[in-house]
């Protein structure tokens, strides 16, 4: 809780993955992948409750052992590859409100961002409070400026590949660009219900994280594959 506002952390963890089965419970440096996120969330001085949303009994058992809450398993229609995180969040909020449990802010923490720390979590919440914002979303610097990128036409002609404004410029002279890194999504509950997104259209602030903590999901899955083949 911060300034008398209650915060619910939701960790989405489906049982099935097309690219890497059981990825959420595979070991990463001696712990199940999901443990890194659960432990960071539980260590936060601001989060009031940590819920893991899963359809899988193995994930549920591990999550409960780690100290997270699982008030109910996720229904199968919200555990498909087509299911969205926002549908899951709205479902959970509706279920909790039936038991008179209400939260002012929701933080979505994906297990596939294991390098995100409790410091990152608490800093993002403090940023929300200090800027009087309704949402905070984590970002990191991109490795290469998108100004050096473009689509290539069918004839492979590069005549208009780069805009004239960046011609003959060094990469260090270009503006710094950022990307969403998927580690932290924090938003006012009422606005989530109304707009059905975390990336709301106004009063949304960027929380800048180090690139080293912003491991890309595909790279993580590749590394987990390699580690668990040994």
Image: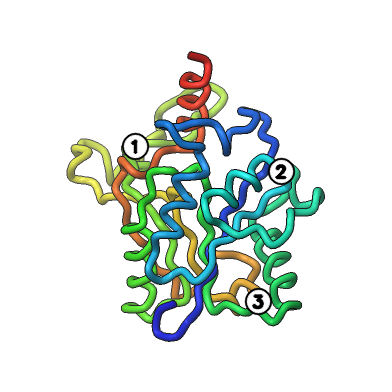
Circle 1 SS class: helix
**Residue 227 locus on image (x, y percent):** 46, 21
Query: Residue 202 placed where, x, y %?
Result: 48, 74
Q: Mark 1–mark 2 contact, CB under 8 Å?
A: no
Query: Label 2 near label 3: C-beta < 8 Å?
Result: no
Residue at 46 percent of width and 30 percent of height:
219
Q: Is residue 83 left or right of residue 221?
A: right
- In front of the other: 2 or 186: 2
Query: Hey, which quadrant is residue 52 in on the image?
Result: bottom right
Q: In front here: 86 or 74? A: 74
Is 1 placed above or below 218 here?
A: below
Q: Which residue is mark 3?
A: 194
Q: Position of residue 136 (x, y in %)?
A: 43, 66
C-alpha separation, residue under disc 1 versus residue under disc 3: 37 Å
Instruction: Please give left or right for residue 124 compared with residue 77 in the image.
Output: left
The numbered mark at residue 148 is: 1
Neighbourhood count class around disc 1 (C-alpha, 10 Å): few under 14, some 14–19, many 20 upward:
few
Q: For the residue carrying disc 2, how many other residues have a C-alpha within 10 Å: few (<14), some (14-19), or many (20+)?
A: some
Q: Nearer the viewer, mark 3 or mark 2?
A: 2
For image coordinates 48% across by 14% down, the residue present is 230
Above or below 146: residue 53:
below
- Which part of the image, by quadrant, shows the N terminus? bottom left
145 w.r.t. 139: above or below:
above
Q: Is residue 190 visible?
A: yes
Q: Secondary structure at mark 3?
A: helix
- Which of the marked residues, 1 or 3, is nearer the chain's N terminus? 1
| Residue annotated with mark 2 | 56
Sequence-first tag of 3 and 2: 2
Give the SS element for disc 2: loop
Is 86 situated left or right of 110 in this image?
right
Please name the residue shown 43% across and 48% down the image: 181
């Amino acid at each position: 809780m911060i300034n008398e506002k209650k915060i619910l952390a939701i960790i989405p963890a489906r049982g099935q993955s097309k690219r890497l089965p059981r990825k959420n419970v595979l070991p990463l440096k001696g712990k199940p992948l999901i443990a890194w996120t659960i432990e960071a969330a539980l260590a936060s001085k601001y989060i009031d409750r940590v819920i893991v949303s899963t359809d899988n009994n193995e994930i549920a058992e591990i999550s409960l052992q780690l100290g997270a809450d699982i008030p109910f398993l996720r229904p199968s229609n919200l555990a498909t590859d087509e299911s969205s995180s926002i549908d899951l969040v709205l479902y959970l909020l509706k279920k909790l409100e039936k038991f008179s449990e209400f939260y002012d802010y929701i933080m979505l923490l994906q297990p596939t961002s294991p390098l995100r720390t409790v410091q990152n979590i608490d800093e993002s919440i403090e940023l929300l409070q200090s800027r009087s914002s309704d949402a905070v979303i984590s970002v990191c610097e991109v490795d290469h400026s998108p100004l050096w990128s473009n689509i290539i036409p069918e004839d492979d002609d590069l005549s208009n590949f780069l805009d004239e404004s960046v011609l003959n410029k060094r990469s260090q002279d270009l503006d710094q660009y950022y990307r969403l890194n998927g580690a932290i999504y924090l938003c006012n509950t009422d606005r989530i219900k109304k707009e059905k997104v975390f990336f709301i259209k106004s009063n949304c602030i960027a929380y800048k994280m180090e690139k080293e903590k912003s491991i890309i999901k595909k790279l993580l899955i590749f590394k987990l594959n390699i580690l668990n083949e040994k």
